Image (cartoon, grey):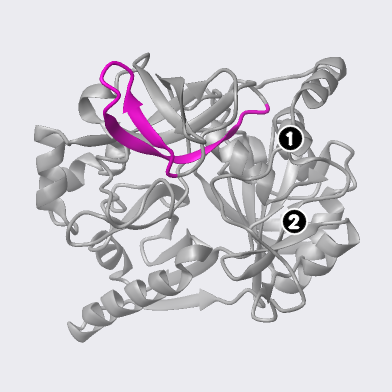
Amino acid sequence: MCSRTFNAAFLAKKILNTKQITSTAVQFRLYSASAKESLKTPLHDLHSKYGGKLVDFAGFLLPVQYSDLSVSASHLFTRQSASIFDVSHMLQTNVRGKDCIAWFESICPVDLKGMAEGTSSLTVFLNDKGGIIDDLIVTKVNNECLYIVSNAGRLEVDKQHMTETSEVFRKRGKDVNISYWDVNQRGLIAVQGPKAILALQTLTDIPLSDLIFMTSRIGSVAGTECRITRCGYTGEDGVEISVPADKAQTITEALLHYEDVKLAGLGARDSLRLEAGLCLYGNDIDESVTPVEANLTWLIAKPRRKQADFPGADIILRQIKEGVSKRRVGIRMETGAPARKNALLKDAASFEVIGKVTSGCPSPYLGGNVAMGYVNESLKKIGTKLLVNIRGKDVPCVVAKMPFVPSNYYTKK
């Protein structure tokens, strides 16, 4: 596990020289009294207490930032120290039964049978054309129990998909039982950054040095039984903690006792994930895109490729063998305005439109701007010069390696 350190002067310079950013990949709606349909997470009162600027995101009231730091400063603080993100809006699902693994492998290309108990994996729900219904993390608690975290923006779609497919299994006499945690029952807290584990270790009985990236355990956190999974959405080391709703604020406040831990909102979460080269559902991936096109071929586990029994297997396996016409790539621009979603990408030589941007924002850590987009397969090579149309003007950009910022996941090497 490599770690990145900043000195105070360098961090201050970064913050002063970086314009405050707002999320460009996620569409936020400012909260108003008319947004009565928006749901509150278990940390709603805490957000108000600490000056959270609330927005509606996927039907939930969440902070885009807090009063003490700009989005850029919060982003940099996460990379230097540790930040807490309220991700309670995400769907937490428990699956039980002796046939739960067979059921899950019928809708995802992950090799759950080959995973050890207590390990987690990123995977995708697929439709019959190989399109991505959602991306999610599944934890194999044991051979008869799974824990799943999926996206809030696909909450109802995912519920319907899991419910309907499991009912088909049960009609065949299989043992699969699904239960969904409501936001009023369960919270989810992401603690991200190089100092996240130092703060958390003082509050938990789990030896975190043994909890490597993509493993999960149940233990006590500030006196409350929780599930801790070593994962995150920022590219930094960190965890997601599944907590009883009525203890979410207490646990968050306990973590905030440490000066190296602050609250962060959706704005920093989005720019951090983009620097880390991570997809956002609805922008960078959706049901019209396959994992191969999304540059996520590694999600198709090798044993599953041999079995060829996951949704859309014929299409995806053919794409792996024969190639695709478009591919998700990283894009860098050193100066100027950032490329926004749906900005057209062009061949620098012919000026022909060859794709479009799906996410883009200024990069607080690197300077300049970063983006993701889809381009013709022939133009995916790193270093390829392109043009991106920003406000009617074609601006030079280049295909870049992702992640833009090196990942710092803890693997105990």
Q: Secondary structure at mark 1?
A: helix
Q: Position of residue 145 (x, y in %)?
A: 42, 66
Q: Quadrant of residue 46?
A: bottom right
Ranked by sequence position, the earlier of labels 2 and 1 is 1
Main secondary structure type of the part rendered in magenta:
strand
The span from disc 2 to disc 1 (Cα, nearest Å) is: 30 Å
Q: Secondary structure at mark 2?
A: strand
In the image, taking residue 223 as reference, residue 288 lies left or right, namely left
Q: Amino acid at mark 1?
A: Ser
Residue drawn where x is 66% and y is 24% of the image: 365
Q: Is residue 357 magenta?
A: yes
**Front residue of this view, candidates 5 and 117:** 5
Q: Is residue 47 above or below residue 353?
A: below
Task: Tell me, yes or no, if residue 400 can be seen here.
Answer: no
Q: Is residue 9 magenta?
A: no
Residue drawn where x is 41% and y is 47% of the image: 121
Q: Are marks 2 and 1 in contact (CB under 8 Å)?
A: no
* Numbered label attached to residue 72: 1
Q: Quadrant of residue 71?
A: top right
Residue neighbourhood size for the residue with mark 1, other residues' Cα within 10 Å, grouped as few (<14), some (14–19), many (≥20): many
Residue under label 2: 221
For the N terminus, the image quarter is: top right
Task: Tell me, yes or no, if residue 7 can be seen here.
Answer: yes
In the image, taking residue 3 as reference, residue 42 lies left or right, namely right
Q: Position of residue 345 (x, y in %)?
A: 36, 31
**Front residue of this view, candidates 28 and 87:** 28
Q: Which residues are magenta?
A: 342-364
Q: Residue furthest front?
A: 392
Residue drawn where x is 33% and y is 18% of the image: 348
**Front residue of this view, candidates 289 and 276:** 289
Q: Amino acid at mark 2?
A: Val
